Image: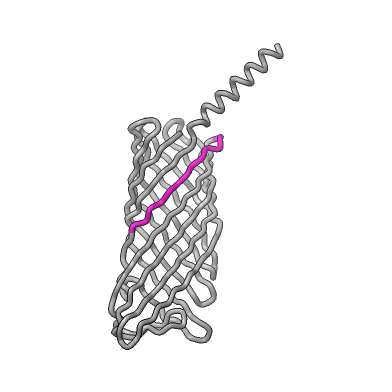
Amino acid sequence: MAGRLVIAAALVLAGFGAAHAQVVDIEGRYWLADLDAATRVESDSIPGTRIDLDRDLGMDDGDLPEIRLGIGTGLNSRLRLAYTHGEVEGARTLEGGIEFAGTTFAATSRVESELELHYGRIGWAWQFIAVPGIFKIGPLFELKGLVVDASLRGRGAGSDVRESQVLAMAFPTVGAMANVTPLAWLEVFAEISGIPFGDLGHVVDAEAGVRIIPFPLLSVSAGYRVLDARIEIDDDFADLTLSGPFLGASLRF
C-alpha cells in the first residue's frame, strides 16, 4: 500500500512538472507610439519653463522595443517581468527663449533634443476561470519603475549650450487582466493597471489586442497600448502620454 502511494505521488509530481515545463513565455514587442509630453525642470532659484516636447522641440513619435518574461506559478497565476526602452529625438528653432535646469536656450537658437525612456515592471496576475475554456479574468499587481532622461543642446543665437536632467520614480500598481479564447488558435486579451500618487504623480498602463497561436510553442500578437504617466519631484515634472499600435511574437516552453 505504501509503495502504491509513493508511486502515485511520484506520478502526480511528474505530471505537475510536465504541466509546468511549458509555462515559460518569452515575448518581444515593437511599439509604434505617438508622444504627447511636457516637462519643466528648475534649478535653485531659477524657474523653469514649461516645455511642450512636440510644439517647442519637435518630438512627436518613437519606436519602443519591449521584452517580457512570463512564468507560470500555478493555480492560473503568472509572474511577469517586462522592460521597455525608447528614445525620441527632435530638432526645432525656438520661437521664444526657454529655461531648462538653470540653462537658458535663447530665442531663434536651434535646439536638438532627446528623450530617453526606461520602463521596468515586475508583477503577478491571478485569473479565475469565468467560462471554462473561453474566458478568464482576475487581478494584476505590479511594481513599476519609470526613468525619464531629457537632454537639450542649443546652437546659434550667440550660444552653444547643453543640459540634461533625469527624473525617476517607482510605485506599486493594481489592475485587472482578461483573456478570451473563442478558438484554440485565437486569443483576445486586455489589461489595465495604475495608481494615482498624489503630488508625486500617477501612472496608467492599458492595452488590448489579439494573439494568434499557429503552433503550440509560438504565437504572434498585435494590439493597441496607452501609457499615461507623470513624475513630479518638487517643482520639476515630466508629463507624458504614449499611445499607438504594437506587434509582438513569443515562444512558450
Residue at 49% from the left image edge and 57% from the top image edge: 194
Classify residue 172 as left or right of residue 188. right
Residue nearer the viewer, 138 or 95: 95
Q: Residue furthest bottom?
A: 158
How is the protein colored in the picture? one colour
Classify residue 7 as left or right of residue 25. right
Classify residue 67 as left or right of residue 1. left
Q: Position of residue 62 (x, y in %)?
A: 33, 61
Q: Main secondary structure of the magenta part?
A: strand
Q: How many marks?
A: 0
Looking at the rendering, the stretch of residues picked out in magenta corresponds to 63-75
Query: Looking at the picture, does residue 23 appear above or below residue 104?
Result: above
Residue at 46% from the left image edge and 66% from the top image edge: 230
For the N terminus, the quadrant is top right
Query: Looking at the picture, does residue 97 appear above or below residue 163?
Result: below
Q: Residue furthest right?
A: 2
Q: Quadrant of residue 251?
A: top left
Q: Position of residue 132 (x, y in %)?
A: 46, 31
Magenta highlight on residue 73 = yes
Magenta highlight on residue 91 = no
Q: Quadrant of residue 86?
A: bottom left
Residue at 51% from the left image edge and 40% from the top image edge: 71
Residue nearer the viewer, 132 or 92: 92
Q: Position of residue 89 (x, y in %)?
A: 33, 67
Residue nearer the viewer, 83 or 47: 83
Q: Quadrant of residue 189?
A: top left
Query: Looking at the picture, does residue 188 appear above or below residue 53?
Result: above
Query: Looking at the picture, does residue 154 appear above or below residue 216?
Result: below
Classify residue 108 as left or right of residue 130. left
Residue at 39% from the left image edge and 51% from the top image edge: 207
